[in-house]
Image: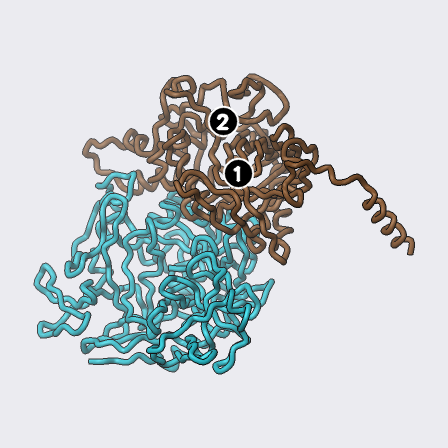
Chain colours: A cyan, B brown
Amino acid sequence: MKKSFMLTAAAMAAVLLAGAAHAQDRSRAPRDAKSLIGAERAKDVPMPPGFKIMPSEIDGPVFADANGMTLYKWQLKALRNGSAGERKNEPACYDVKTTETAGLMSPYPPGLVLPELDTRPACTDVWKPVYAAANSKAIDKWTVLTRKDGTKQWAYDGFALYTSVLDRAPGEVAAAPKKARGDAPSYREAVKPPSDIPPGFEVTSTTRGRLLSTTSQQSVYFFDGDTATKTGCTGDCTQTWKPILAPSVGQTTEGWTIFERSPGVRQWAFRGKPLYINVLDREGRSQEGSDTPGWHNVYLQMSPPPPKAFTVQVTSSGEVLADAAGKTIYTYACADDSVDQLNCDHPSETQAYRFGMCGAGDPDRCLATFPYVLAGKDDQSLSQTWTVEWIDPKTGKFAEVNAPGALKVWAYRQRPVYTYAGDKRPGDINADGFGEFRGLRNGYKALWLRDDFYNGAGD
Amino acid sequence: MKHSLLASAAAAALLVAPAAKADDTAPPNRTIGYVVSGLYWAVYQTADGKAECPDGLNDGPREHFKALFPDNGTKRPVVDTQLKREAEGYFPTMTEEPFTFHLSQSKIAKGLNLDGKADDNDFVSPDGEKGIDNQLFRVLGCVRGYRAPDGDAYFFDNNTLITDRYDRWLFELTDVDSLVNDDDVTVTTYRGLDGLLKKADGNGMLAGGSQVIDVKWGGRYVAKIKGKIKDGVLTTEPTDVTFPWATFGVPTDREMRGMRMQVKVLPTGGTGLIAGYTDLENWYRQTLRSSSTHHQAYGQVSLPSVYRALRRAADGHPDPKTGENTTLSSALDVTLTQVHIIHPDRPVAQADEATKTAEAVKERAGARR
């Protein structure tokens, strides 16, 4: 069965809103104000009955079950002392509660007792296998696996599929919000259909939006001086801004056209704007070119805007999101060192790791070291990405609205965000990398909007 | 009218002034740029290490963990073991620990005489100069990770300095009439944005590359310093600096108070020392965030132990309230490679930020005095 993907009106409106208003910058006009507003499309791909493609706010189109809940995979990842995750056709997440660490990250040995065993979930308590009916039939990349207990489970490209108990609503991707690079844990990731872009392009998630680049990771730009039928970039301009040429067999698709800038010279255009790379970009997926007046990165869709009171601050490496006082915003990421690599950074999960890192086990010290970013009395959730949550600071867990002692805080992808007491001035990033493995495993990272040196704003 | 007359007179004076005193070693336009292409905390080592570390090298995180939590079949919670040890890094204390930390016992150290004195706590340079201040060496001298040639910090700190553009530290010398003898040159530091040119054999860098000044994010790294060149050696006046030195992808900087250079300069590069008082908290926290216990274990760098030693060895900038020193005398082995420094059309943004940074350093120092 073939399904085509189209955003719902509500989702489209949300994305339009996201594109129109971005992070507030008190010192300069937002650079992304000229972005090519729209929503990312997925290619038409074969799918079994009962599955669909859903728009998501940050990750673009994702595969979902019949209820619209995002599908995840857990692909094997090499860690310091071994690997964790699943090989193709070999589900590894079962109804078994692990009790000890696996020692996958040196220098600590395996066999340490995991925290809160009485409430610790089994892998399948938090990652629900997507079961297949006995008569389910494989189609294209969709196959049916047999689990150890004989039940059938759907797989995509060989990897077993799951939904997450953290996702609250269709299209949400709350269970995989982290950077999976380097020494990060073996995280689950949303399973995505291919984006509906021509060959030679790719799209990646960044804090600002779904960034378009070439497959060699060169950022793609458009120019204010261009129209769909006329270019303002000729002569010397093209020495710096190199038109991205379309092959003679290049096919147009929705949003994508071919602009003939001179006889026989065909240039890709997107949403009415011819596309270029900047030969002066120093890194892949760069935003450097957008510093040139009139030139902008191309995003297939923008991320939802943060709270209006937030600011953007300049650091030694790029731009970070900051609170109203200019203090850098931090997110906390965690997964344990068990064979399950279960998350430990969500208010519904154990807070033992976070308390251990931010306050040597003392919640009050945590609160002093990494204060929550408080929401105002009248503030409400803005999107699935930016929500208002009530948190009990003594436990770090969700609290009832207006519960005694509870704090009303801002959360990014369902997890509270923080500032750091050690940051004294706007632009300080003294807690970026605070925690185990430079903040990648059990620690804090600044919420980067742009990082010209380490791609901190990207996946 | 009066002003224009004065200006004319001045111009005439310039015309009749003696020709520039530049000699044939002077660089074109009396300007030469260098990029830092090698940087190591200066650790003086003997062949077998026994002179400076008679009790051996220090143990690291792996050995300490094993000593604290022996593998005897006892089941221990991750919270009370691994997380506790990690937290001790981020919340270090001066409480006694059941380990002995070996300070360097060397009488010899690389470095400069920062305070103009020669006292019992000072070292003698390898060339016999007395009064060398380098208490950071006293702490790191017996830590395997900081020793050549294969200490993990020794290797990785320098390796990422080469590979990561974030760490591109530039020195531009202007008003240079001679690269051999000039009693008044100006040294301006910047952050560059470009890669280094590695020699084809992989050893060392090629001179003659270009570096564009980072005018967007690099304001905090700008410092203007007076210096002189004598017998080919550049020395500079003490200046507070912040310089970029990140390892493993965490953008972090170093703060050095009263930084000064002693570098042999040539048209193609230079080698020598950068010395000054390293801010203790900055050094510790930068090291903590840039690395990980995993990498520290490679080099047997137990940071909670190192922190205690740093506090005890600190010899500069006493806190005005507690009297405790907040900086350590220190030195860096530096290699410079000549580059053409390109000034973009626009000025360095955050120029005031650089001032603020320096002021902030001074403010903190002032608060401590």
Q: Residue at x 37, y 62 (%)?
A: A216
Q: Residue A116: x, y in percent?
A: 27, 49
Lower sequence index among marks 2 and 1: 2
Q: What is the quadrant of residue B58 in the picture?
A: top left
Question: How far, Cα to Cα, is label 2 from label 1?
Answer: 33 Å
Q: Are marks 2 and 1 on the same chain?
A: yes
Q: Residue at x 58, y 43 (%)?
A: B33
Q: Is residue A123 left or right of residue A382?
A: left
Residue B276 can be seen, yes or no: no
Provide the residue designation for mark 1: B336
Say which of marks 2 and 1 sits in front.
Answer: 1
Answer whether labels 2 and 1 touch (C-beta < 8 Å): no
* Res B312 label: 2
From this view, report whether residue B164 is shown above or below residue A449.
above
Q: Residue A34: x, y in percent?
A: 52, 73
Q: Residue at x 59, y 50 (%)?
A: B219
Q: Is residue A226 left or right of residue A166?
A: right
Q: Residue A37: x, y in percent?
A: 46, 76
Q: Amino acid at mark 1?
A: Leu
From this view, report whether residue A144 is shown above or below residue B236.
below
Q: Is residue A158 left or right of residue A13?
A: left
Q: Amino acid at mark 2?
A: Arg
**Circle 1 SS class:** strand
> Relative to the observer, which residue lies in front, A171 or B14?
B14
Crowdedness near tag 2: few (<14), some (14–19) or many (≥20) residues, C-alpha within 10 Å: some
